[in-house]
Image (cartoon, rainbow, N blue to C red):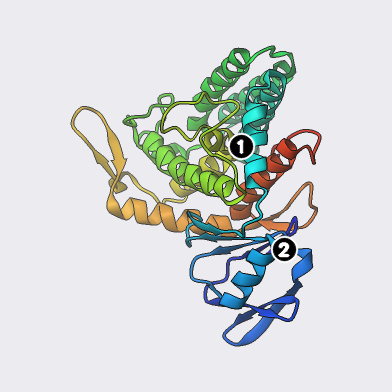
């Protein structure tokens, strides 16, 4: 459990939240773990099997403070709010800003800048840890290419140019990923460019599975703060497409990439964990899916020092924080949207 940006996040299973005068008291197995004055909170987000007393729910509703329920995997389930809600104002601001070309371009640049910067860190780390000088050289050149794309981004005059910069950078990035894979498993996990619907090789299948879970986390985060996940700034609006969730996940794709490489290089996922279909499609088999889901949930429990908040934050909470930063930007409480950047 942790309080960030006036929001209380409760991730410990079987926690019990109840009202104690003007304080939220959190107990685990009848032992008090935390007390937070109610007036310090803008809302509460609970993950999975967490109990909330009716008295606390009534008080939150009376105060206009939100209670967001997510399942144990971070999937959005419900949001409890009282009759006075700022969400309509936030959604109206989102729709107004989506028609503001300058604002849309600025947010799109920020999303891609975060993606390129964090992807570059994946390549630089790969170069540092490479056992072969030739591999390290390829990865270093790939990192230089992404740095050049980052420098070109501020000059992108419209969304099509931003998308073009991103597309070329992604092609260069995925062209380097093979050189981070352990040499003795490269044949089984060779990535021949990014392929989807269906993935054409094991590494693409693994990445697609991880991206799907990341997408769900980002969509849940946006819904939990009251944003419309279908109205994006970088990705075009289409029926049934969660464009804003796609925008938000750009800066977090490196998390999925790093985990995929770790699972392969440590042998936690092997060639036999995939099913090769007629026609060339490849999918994760049941045991492979279980391994990846468990690893993803464990990775989200890891913490890092947040560069803006300057305090430890679980990786799984980062989409929530960035969704809240985006909401603040739309309201005008922040001057511009700042993507999450790896140090």
Q: Is residue 18 above or below residue 92?
A: below
Residue at x 79%, y 47% (from the top left corner): 308
Q: Is residue 268 above or below residue 52?
A: above
Residue at x 43%, y 26% (from the top left corner): 194
Label 1's element? helix
Query: Extreme bottom residue here?
Result: 30
Q: Nearer the viewer, residue 72 or 229?
A: 229
Q: Nearer the viewer, residue 138 or 246?
A: 246
Question: Nearer the observer, disc 2 or disc 1?
Answer: 2
Q: Which mark is residue 3?
A: 2
Q: Position of residue 33 (x, y in %)?
A: 68, 79
Q: In the rendered view of the protein, which quadrant contains the C terminus? A: top right
How far apart, in angstroms, are the residues tagged by discs 2 and 1?
30 Å
Q: Position of residue 97 (x, y in %)?
A: 67, 28
Q: Which mark is residue 122?
A: 1
Q: Which mark is residue 148?
A: none
């Amino acid at each position: 459990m942790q309080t960030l940006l006036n929001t209380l996040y409760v991730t410990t299973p079987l926690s019990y939240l109840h009202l104690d005068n003007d304080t939220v008291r959190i107990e685990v197995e009848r032992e008090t773990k935390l007390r937070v004055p109610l007036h310090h909170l803008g809302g509460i987000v609970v993950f999975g099997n967490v109990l909330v007393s009716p008295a606390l729910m009534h008080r939150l509703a009376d105060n206009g403070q939100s209670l967001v329920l997510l399942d144990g995997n971070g999937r959005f389930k419900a949001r409890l709010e009282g009759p006075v809600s700022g969400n309509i104002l936030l959604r109206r601001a989102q729709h107004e800003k989506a028609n503001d070309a300058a604002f849309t371009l600025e947010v799109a640049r920020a999303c891609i800048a975060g993606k390129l910067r964090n992807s570059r860190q994946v390549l630089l780390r790969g170069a540092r840890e490479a056992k072969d000088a030739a591999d390290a050289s390829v990865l270093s050149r790939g990192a230089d290419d992404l740095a050049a794309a980052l420098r070109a981004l501020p000059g992108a005059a419209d969304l099509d140019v931003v998308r073009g910069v991103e597309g070329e950078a992604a092609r260069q990035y995925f062209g380097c990923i093979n050189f981070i894979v352990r040499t003795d498993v490269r044949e089984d996990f060779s990535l021949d460019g990014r392929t989807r619907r269906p993935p054409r090789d094991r590494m693409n299948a693994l990445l697609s599975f991880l991206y799907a879970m990341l997408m769900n986390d980002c969509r849940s985060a946006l819904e939990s703060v009251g944003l419309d996940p279908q109205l994006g700034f970088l990705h075009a609006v289409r029926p049934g497409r969660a464009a804003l969730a796609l925008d938000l996940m750009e800066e977090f794709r490196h998390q999925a990439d790093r985990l995929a490489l770790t699972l392969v290089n440590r042998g936690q996922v092997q060639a036999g964990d995939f099913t090769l279909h007629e026609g060339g499609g490849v999918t994760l088999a049941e045991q492979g899916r279980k391994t990846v889901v468990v690893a993803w949930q464990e990775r989200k429990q890891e913490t890092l020092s947040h560069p803006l908040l300057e305090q430890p934050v679980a990786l799984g909470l980062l989409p929530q924080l960035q969704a809240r930063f985006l909401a603040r930007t739309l309201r005008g409480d922040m001057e511009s949207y700042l993507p999450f950047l790896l140090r």
